[in-house]
Image: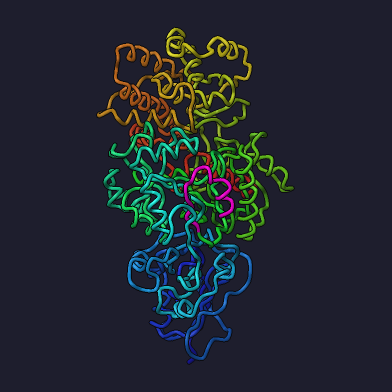
Amino acid sequence: MKDRSVRIRVRGQVQGVGFRPFVWQLAQEFGLRGRVLNDPEGVLVEAAGDGLEGFLAALPGRIPKLARVDAVEVADFDGDLPAEGFEIAASRGAGAETRVTPDAATCPDCAAEIRGDGRRQGYAFTNCTHCGPRFTILRGLPYDRARTTMAAFPMCRDCAAEYANPADRRFHAQPVACPACGPRLWFEGPGQGDPVAAAVALLQAGGVVAVKGLGGFHLACDAANPAAVALLRQRKHRPAKPFALMGHAAALHRVAILAEADLALMRDPAAPVVLVPGRAVLPEAVAPGMASLGVMLPYTPLHHLLLDGFGGVLVMTSGNLSGEPQVVGNDEARAKLAGFADGFLLHDRDIARRLDDSVERASPPMILRRARGRVPGTLPLPPGFADAPQVLALGGQMKGAICLLKNGQALLGHHLGDLDDALCATEFDRAVADYTALFDHHPALVAVDAHPGYRATRVGQAMGLPVAEIWHHHAHLAACLAENLWPLDGGSVAAIVLDGTGLGPDGTLWGGEILLGDYQGFTRRHWLRPAPLVGGDRAAREPWRNALVRLDQAGLADWADALFPDRPRDLARQAAAKGINAPLSSSAGRLFDAVAACLQLCPDRQTYEGEAAMRLEALARQFPGTDVGRDFATEGAEIDPAPMFDDLFRLAGRRAASERLAWQFHAGLARAFAAQARALVETGAAKAVVLSGGCFQNALLQDLALDALAGVPVLIHRSTPANDGGLALGQAMVAAAQAVSN
């Protein structure tokens, strides 16, 4: 009797993760004959043999650690198969229906190998099927060496033997290389000899080194050296924004408090920057005004070697001019970073696309910046979206990111920065072309923010496709629903959306809202009492402006005069009264700025986005206990912070501790919005509460809101940013819902 022959289609993140050698080894174990290959849809297996049922049962549970399987489809096959043996066949076809693997941190085997005595001892580009560059070297699909930036490095005989050996962990590892055939490392700067040793010597002497990494350049210096940190801040013109840190776990333990959840996240193949409590042993200039540090483990062999030689903790911040994208090319680095760096640690493997480091928290789980190691991972679409068309969503103006819907998956792209910057805008255009070509995406419509002045909106409107204009805060609502797989017909939710600003349907700038709605629509049920943004965009940079108008609203003009004696208060008040360059806004982000200014936290100017709010949260976390929140008033639909400012004035006059006042503000804000959202659930108008918007990056605010919503179903962001980095996902979902329903 003829053996049953089957064709097995495996969909998901299955290319570049050692899936074909895994299938080959499993086929040997079960005595199958046939073949496995890559094609545009993923991995294809054609096989026959007595052990077929055992093979099919074992396949899903034993996949490689970097693989993510969405589906395994089995059908009878009547084509030709080898009479005996099982082979890894050449890839077929062009285009992309499969997922691409994100870059993965160096695995323990490769980390041990570079410290061993073998031919890869000290080799900075060591990798295998379980780790190494993927998305940052990829030029096209299917994922084969010829379509990566490793194509310039033909394998030597030894590497080719590993690549061809099914028993080797480098079997079909596309970036495989060694010192005889792979990329080369060198150092430009003072010192000679070994490049890593020269870089270490410069770092130990207090210098700044530009280091070429996976997705771009870092600027590194000794984090424990106050003069080195100050020098880097001076050169970068970055007076206060916290620096990310890199070190081995033992060194990081000495400067930060690392819980098991933090370490587990840091050791994830994505190797993100993780926010953790600091021990206050590093210079204040590393993270001015912050109680937390952003730390990461070395995630390439080069980083491992550098830190082995250095022995401590390094500042490892993006190598870029202020506001511009990260530098990726050697010549670009020499031109743009020469004023920052005393030396350059370079190599000759090109970076196909620039990716910043991802930034995350372990507790509560939260992605603040989705980038290297997380993209281009996809998210499944919720029930009800099976017939959704291909959609391209272009996000907002700040924290640019795009999203593609295709085949029941959402691909939320990487962090692109502020599109007001010309080079970030160029990166945005490049990302749109790159993702759509790489993933063979043919959108039926494009989704954009309803704000006509956003660059991404104008780009979408010029594409010649049907355009869905999505209100900013509706997109935040929908993004959180999508991440939590809320069904299309799941019913309405009460969404607390707190952020900076976004255009609302009434023509004002929203930012402190409770929306009742779903993917298809919403109504605005409650909102923060609007206040004028005096000076327009300057209000987001100068917190005193927001404090002035909020204190005036609360009848505390005299306190405002006392707090800000040297500011142009009369002109600001005239502008507010006449509505001259002072649009009304319900922004919760600007409320944070106002309270921070009242507590004298960078009242005159923020040196980076969110500085006042971040300092306010850090101050609140210094409060050793819990306390009742300051009261807000609810008058009809408006939530008025005036009583909170009145309490703030009275308590500040009694010399109450600032950390207690900061904590009470957080608690009061959370309680005021939670009470109204809870009421919508308890009356049956909503089935759950959503927490979204950039203010919910504030873990203290989120925790306090969750406490105030105890007993009520609550949806939060975990794997997508609550800020505008997740906006494109929500836009895509709203557009898809409207298309499916029509």
- Rendered view: 431 above or below 58: above
In front: 238, or 625?
238
714 relative to 476 in the view: left or right: left
Q: Position of residue 296 (x, y in %)?
A: 38, 50
Name the residue rendered at 41%, 79% in the picture.
Answer: 25
Magenta stretch holds residue 407: no
Q: Position of residue 166 (x, y in %)?
A: 43, 79
Q: Position of residue 683 (x, y in %)?
A: 43, 31
Magenta stretch holds residue 339: yes
In front: 658, or 287?
287
Q: Position of residue 706 (x, y in %)?
A: 36, 36
Q: Is residue 365 visible?
A: no
Q: Is residue 372 visible?
A: yes
Its colouring scheme is: rainbow
- Rendered view: 502 above or below 309: above
Which residue is most to the right? 464
- Rendered view: 392 above or below 663: below
Bounds of the magenta segment? 330-346
Name the residue rendered at 33%, 28% in the picture.
Answer: 620
In front: 132, or 712?
132
Which residue is most to the left? 625
662 relative to 146 in the view: left or right: left
